[in-house]
């Protein structure tokens, strides 16, 4: 919001890299170089699917110093809200999209003595950019990458070729190969940082183990983007805009606000960054907090809501917007 | 005379043993021993079974897995450095004693890539400060007054709350630069 720094891009290539995973190469329409980013950064991709504007966050996986193009990899999700289905089924080479500036909510802590990455499935994407960056900086890292099977796993062959098997360890669920989390976390030198990206259950499991083994929270990093969950229809009164809108079953408050032509602040659209935090002036019903940003006591207070993923079970909510 | 209200002034929130840590490494100086003994009273002595205690001078009257007494602060800092190089994740570092000691030990830890927020600290003993002269860059230990005379270049320095973790020192700025010799009388501020 306020200053529009979005960039118009064109799809330069679409490559099927594994079962249900496609890579999209995006170049600027105006031919200018794209900004350099830092490993772990994501962009919000805006796509016009018919009349519907979809906006989803995706981690950048290309080299952070490659200014000719950005690359994202997208998993085709079965119960997709439409974003991944649109990218997989409707988008063609030459089509235009709008992307935000890169934003990093999952940066490497460069003070670390050693860095351990744990990826589950499509959660590999931010680590691809991070490893490229760390190689340039001669940082000490290793990757533990768990996938369903060899067909569904993306990039594991090329990662092993590029970084060697002792730094890229692979595990396949169907072969009963699992990341030996306890053994890894129990034997790291002081000053090691851990980064986890993958399904929510995997992230929680790894972080809980690390905490139980005495890792301080300063050394634990994770990223998960949450898709807004569907729910009941409710009304949202926007006090400052003097408007009342209806939030649909498959719509987030933020999406409904934007559809009404109101410019609300946001960055990640996945409940992680805190940018869209909005004051609640009143609520007829219960707020369903789906974000991972607010502290439990903030959620319990009922005074604030992350409008990108959270919603109301009940009649209506009044927002300071 | 003191310049206060500067955000970099360290805050020492207490040793508070982290019972989830698999090892506890203590570096203690002077009255810092008391902070450890208070923790034993508060949470029991079991954590001592997985503790390494490094002390300047007298050792506390407890039984830990490993205890070692250093004759001076620099000797202890050398040993702490070696311990940190060999330590594993799951080890928590605890520092207690004067500010100058905590700061110097923390600098060793920072150089070993440890996040300062994960280090538990408790200030005990004298409030005397370790101050860097911003003009000659010399560091004077045990500064009890402000202003004070730089032990290296002799300028009259005003002590600020402006602190550098990298140097483990507060910053001292010349107070009578325009008219040398007009510095106010030193006042004991850090007994």
Image (tube, coloured by chain):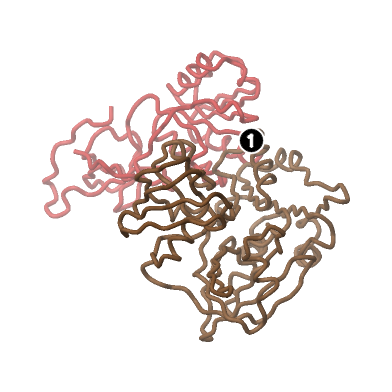
Chain colours: A brown, B red
Left-right relation of B154 to B45: left
Residue B49 visible in this rendered orientation of the protein: yes
The number of numbered badges drawn on the structure is 1
Measuring from the top left, give residue A9's x and y in whole percent.
Answer: 55, 79
Q: Is residue B146 above or below residue A222?
A: above
As drawn, which residue projects farthest toward the right? A175
Foreground pick, A188 / A287? A287
Judging from the image, mark 1 belongs to the subunit labelled: B
Quadrant housing residue A22: bottom right
Residue A105 visible in this rendered orientation of the protein: no
Question: Residue placed at 61% from the left, 50% from the top?
Answer: A113
Left-right relation of A296 to A261: right
Question: Residue placed at 56% from the left, 40% from the top?
Answer: A217
For label 1, the SS is loop
Foreground pick, A291 / B90? A291
What crowding class fits label 1: few (fewer than 14 Cα within 10 Å), some (14-19), or many (20 or more)?
Answer: many
Q: Is residue B13 above or below residue A10?
A: above
Kindly identify which residue carries mark 1.
B90
Measuring from the top left, give residue B72's x and y in whole percent.
Answer: 48, 30
Question: Residue placed at 46% from the left, 21% from the top?
Answer: B35
Q: Is residue A206 above or below residue A92?
A: above
Quadrant housing residue A42: bottom right
Q: Quadrant of the C terminus of chain B?
A: top left
Q: Quadrant of the N terminus of chain B?
A: top left
Measuring from the top left, give residue A88's x and y in whole percent.
Answer: 70, 71
Measuring from the top left, give residue A128's x and y in whole percent.
Answer: 67, 63
Foreground pick, A209 / A77? A77
Left-right relation of B58 to B131: right
Quadrant housing residue A284: top left
Q: Is residue B153 above or below residue A262?
A: above
């Amino acid at each position: 919001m306020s200053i529009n720094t979005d960039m118009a891009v064109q799809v330069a290539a679409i490559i099927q890299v594994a079962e249900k995973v496609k890579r999209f190469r995006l170049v600027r329409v105006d031919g200018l170089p794209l900004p350099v980013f830092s490993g772990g950064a994501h962009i919000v991709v805006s796509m016009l699917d018919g009349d519907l504007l979809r906006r989803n966050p995706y981690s950048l996986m290309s080299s952070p110093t490659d200014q000719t193009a950005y690359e994202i990899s997208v998993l085709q999700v079965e119960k997709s809200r439409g974003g991944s289905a649109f990218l997989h089924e409707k988008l063609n080479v030459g089509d235009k999209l709008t992307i935000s500036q890169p934003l990093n909510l999952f940066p490497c802590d460069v003070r670390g003595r050693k860095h351990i990455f744990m990826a589950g499935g499509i959660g590999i994407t931010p680590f691809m950019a991070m490893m490229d960056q760390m190689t340039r900086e001669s940082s000490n890292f290793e990757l533990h990458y768990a996938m369903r099977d060899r067909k569904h796993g993306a990039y594991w062959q090329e990662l092993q070729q590029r970084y060697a098997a002792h730094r890229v360890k692979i595990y396949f669920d169907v072969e009963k190969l699992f990341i030996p989390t306890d053994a890894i976390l129990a034997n790291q030198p002081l000053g090691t940082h851990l980064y986890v990206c993958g399904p929510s259950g995997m992230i929680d499991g790894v972080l809980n183990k690390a905490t139980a083994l005495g890792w301080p929270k300063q050394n634990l990093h994770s990223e998960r983007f949450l898709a807004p969950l569907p729910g009941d229809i409710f009304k949202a009164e926007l006090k400052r805009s003097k408007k009342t809108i209806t939030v649909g079953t498959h719509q987030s408050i933020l999406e409904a606000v934007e559809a009404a032509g109101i410019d609300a602040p946001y960055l990640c659209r996945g409940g992680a960054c805190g940018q869209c935090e909005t004051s609640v002036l009143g609520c007829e019903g219960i707020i369903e907090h789906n974000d991972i940003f607010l502290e439990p006591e903030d959620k319990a207070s009922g005074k604030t809501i992350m409008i990108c993923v959270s919603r109301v079970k009940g009649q209506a909510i009044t927002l300071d917007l | 005379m003191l310049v206060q209200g500067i955000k970099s002034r360290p805050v020492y929130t207490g040793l508070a043993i982290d019972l989830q840590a698999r090892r506890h490494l203590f570096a203690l100086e002077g009255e810092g021993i008391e902070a450890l003994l208070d923790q034993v009273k508060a949470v029991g002595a079991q954590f001592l079974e997985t503790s390494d205690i490094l002390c300047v001078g007298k050792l506390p009257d407890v039984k830990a897995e490993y205890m070692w007494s250093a004759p001076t602060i620099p000797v202890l800092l050398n040993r702490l450095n070696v311990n940190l190089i060999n330590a594993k994740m799951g080890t928590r570092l605890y520092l207690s004693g004067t500010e100058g000691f905590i700061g110097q030990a923390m600098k060793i830890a920072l150089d070993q890539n440890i996040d300062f927020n994960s280090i538990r600290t408790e200030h005990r003993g004298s409030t005397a400060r370790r101050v860097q002269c911003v003009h000659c860059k010399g560091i004077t230990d045990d500064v009890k007054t402000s202003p004070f005379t730089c032990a290296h270049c002799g300028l009259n320095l005003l002590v600020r709350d402006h602190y550098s973790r990298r140097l483990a020192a507060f910053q001292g700025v010349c107070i009578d630069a325009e008219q040398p010799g007009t510095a106010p009388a030193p006042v004991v501020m850090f007994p």
